């Protein structure tokens, strides 16, 4: 599907990761953070996150968890992630080490995610390559030279050094081995002055289709670094209809590829390991399927 491009994809490829990833930062390999790599079989997009919860939410929404793309340092050169709300294909997310480029894209309508903070960091001695698909605007990042070479043979462009990692992931060319995702670390406490930021972050997750329950939204905001009170305030003041979210989640589970029964959907909606909706919200969803 063709998308509305707010900023030239070719220009992004030329200006972004290639020019801004110039130097390799030193980093301790004893303090590594796994960067999970996911794939959307509907849009063809690869997605990268250090957030266990975000990876799980995407998995629940139908994405494939391909494994750990690579190991990132806990500090180093910042890497930012932006989201294009007008794109619905492989070019909807973009990663850059340039705060100038991120700011420019934001001025054009992109959402600068993670409160304009680094999503992860570049550093170490393992090269991470980026290739660009001129057909859908997507970018693929990998530590595998084999995978990058195969993409170029298939018609992808650019093929440049994007950043560095402290270690490779569990990729073997384009083949990714299954992994067990480790629990997310406890977030550092923040002050209640960030209540407004918590509200805006909750609104962003809602706007991009994360039909979370109130509890899962609170969990996600806490993972992003908000304190308990700020996270609850953000969830409660973002104007979210939790019944509507429960119904949207139920419709996802009732359709392909899940095709779950109403009883199984109800259990998934209320489960503490699932969606964490209240029994009343789950029943509303079942009644309105």
Image (tube, grey):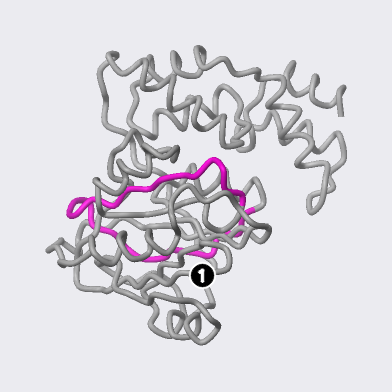
**Res. 165 in view:** no
What secondary structure is the magenta-colored segment mainly?
strand
In the image, residue 282 lies at what x, y percent?
75, 24
**Residue at 29%, 14% in the rendered image:** 192
Residue 142 lies, with reference to residue 63, above or below; the image says below
| In-front residue for pair 114/70 | 114
Left or right of 286 on screen, residue 201: left
**Residue at 44%, 76% in the rendered image:** 157
What are the residue bounds of the magenta stretch?
63-88
In the image, residue 249 lies at what x, y percent?
71, 34
Instruction: Locate the N terminus by quadrant.
Output: bottom right
Left or right of 51 on screen, residue 175: right
Q: Which residue is mark 1?
A: 133
**Residue at 42%, 51% in the rendered image:** 49
Residue 75 lies, with reference to residue 133, above or below; the image says above
**Residue at 28%, 67% in the rendered image:** 18
Report how many numbered discs are placed on residues in the image. Answer: 1
Instruction: Locate the C terminus by quadrant.
Output: top right
**Res. 24 in view:** yes
In the image, residue 25 lies at what x, y percent?
14, 63
Residue 72 within the segment the image draws in magenta: yes
Residue 92 within the segment the image draws in magenta: no
Left or right of 152 on screen, residue 41: right
* Residue at the limit of the structure toward the left, as seen here: 26
Q: Secondary structure at mark 1?
A: loop
| In-front residue for pair 270/116 | 116
Left or right of 271 on screen, residue 216: left
| In-front residue for pair 29/6 | 6
In the picture, residue 229 is in which quadrant?
Answer: top left
In the image, residue 30 lies at what x, y percent?
19, 61
């Amino acid at each position: 599907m063709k998308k509305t491009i707010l900023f030239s994809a070719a220009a992004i490829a030329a200006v972004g990761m290639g020019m801004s990833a110039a130097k390799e930062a030193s980093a301790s390999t004893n303090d590594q953070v796994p960067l999970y790599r996911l794939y959307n079989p509907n849009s063809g997009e690869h997605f990268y996150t250090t957030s266990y919860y975000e990876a799980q939410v995407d998995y629940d929404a139908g994405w494939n968890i391909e494994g750990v793309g690579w190991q990132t340092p806990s500090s180093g050169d910042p890497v930012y992630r932006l989201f294009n709300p007008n794109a619905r294909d492989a070019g909807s997310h973009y990663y850059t080490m340039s705060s100038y480029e991120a700011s420019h894209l934001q001025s054009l309508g992109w959402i600068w995610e993670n409160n304009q903070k680094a999503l992860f960091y570049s550093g170490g001695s393992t090269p991470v390559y980026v290739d660009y698909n001129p057909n859908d605007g997507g970018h693929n990042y990998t530590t595998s030279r084999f995978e990058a070479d195969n993409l170029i043979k298939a018609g992808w462009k650019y093929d440049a050094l994007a950043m560095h990692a402290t270690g490779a992931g569990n990729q073997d060319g384009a083949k990714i081995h299954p992994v067990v995702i480790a629990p997310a670390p406890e977030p550092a406490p923040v002050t209640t002055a960030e209540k407004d930021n918590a509200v805006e972050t909750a609104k962003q997750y809602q706007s991009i289709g994360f039909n979370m329950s109130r509890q899962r939204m609170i969990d996600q905001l806490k993972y992003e670094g908000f304190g308990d009170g700020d996270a609850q305030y953000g969830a409660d003041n973002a104007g979210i209809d939790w019944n509507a979210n429960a119904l949207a989640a139920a419709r996802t589970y009732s359709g392909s590829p899940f095709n779950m029964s109403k009883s199984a959907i109800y259990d998934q909606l209320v489960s503490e390991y699932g969606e964490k909706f209240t029994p009343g919200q789950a029943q509303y969803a079942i009644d309105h399927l």
